[in-house]
Amino acid sequence: MSIEAQWDDSFYKLSFALKQDIENDTIQRREKLPSIVSLAEQYNVSKQLMKAVIQQFIQDEIIISRPGVGMFVSTQPIFSLGIEQLGSVTQMISNAGKTPGTQYVSAEVVQPSKSDFNYFKDDHIDGLAKIERVRTADGEPVVYCIDKVDHKLMPMDQIHSKHSIFQLLEEHSKNKIAYAVAFIEPISFDSQISPILNCQPDQALLLLKQIHYTDSDEPILLSENYFRPDVFQFYVVRKRI
């Protein structure tokens, strides 16, 4: 066997062994990987071969390298959702076969800001119910939610009784949320939110900001949901016109 063929064979065998250890959780996701030298010793291969395989895994997004931090096994998103689908975070989590949970951070009535007035298009709103929560899936924090709604439409003494603000708002206000206009953008590390969601310092968040409308086209709910990008994946179905 030629040297090149031997290299290819060794490369394939090492790649297969590493993937097997990742899939069966021998190598834990989100835990920092040992150095290339340590991995080479562990798998009884040369440093050059281990470095080549790791570089291929980084290119294939199986492993991510964080400069100054280390290497980690990429996590596959648990939730893959079409952004054209309108539903509550509770529904998103339940539809993935997970148990939704809620940890309340704060609930208060605040004065609307200038941007709030622009979103709600109502200069007569004298106060907004602002509710901040951490949403969990099987007990693990996955979304940080900030919801704002006219305080007259939100029974503040009942917010702890339901996981879904959607449901509570619709039941109390007798308004049906029909659609939403959404904006999605990446957000860098947030000193308050990122640690709560167990995000790494170099890990961005996905902000999904939505203004929800009733079937009579009235804006009723402003939501800012910060998603962990290693847990949620959004896509859009585009149709040819």
Image: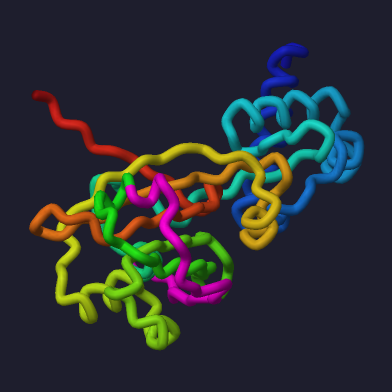
Q: Residue at x 50, y 74 (%)?
A: 107
In the rendered view, does 65 fall on the left or right side of 214? right
- Would you identify the image quadrant in which residue 42 lies? top right
- On screen, residue 88 versus residue 135, left or right, reads left
In the displayed structure, does residue 165 sit left or right of residue 102?
Answer: left
Q: Quadrant of residue 162?
A: bottom left
Residue at the spot x=48%, y=76% of the render? Answer: 101
Asked whether 53 or 112 is in front, the reply is 112
- The x, y position of residue 77, in whole percent, is 49, 50
In this picture the colour scheme is: rainbow
Q: Nearer the viewer, residue 216 or 200?
A: 216
Question: Front-most of 158 and 203?
Answer: 158
Q: Quadrant of the N terminus?
A: top right
Q: Is residue 92 above or below residue 52?
A: below
Magenta includes 96?
Answer: yes
Q: Which residue is at a point 22% across and 74% down the rendered structure image?
A: 170
**Count of picture labels:** 0
Residues in magenta, as a range: 95-117
Q: Is residue 205 left or right of residue 82?
A: right
Q: Is residue 81 visible?
A: no
Q: Nearer the viewer, residue 43 or 124?
A: 124
Please report the residue visible at 79 percent of the width from the left and 45 percent of the height from the top.
Answer: 33
Q: Quadrant of the C terminus?
A: top left
Question: Where residue 186 appears, x then y in whole percent?
Answer: 52, 38
Question: Can residue 149 be seen?
Answer: yes
Q: Is residue 149 magenta?
A: no
Name the spot of residue 28 as percent of width and height, x first. Answer: 70, 56
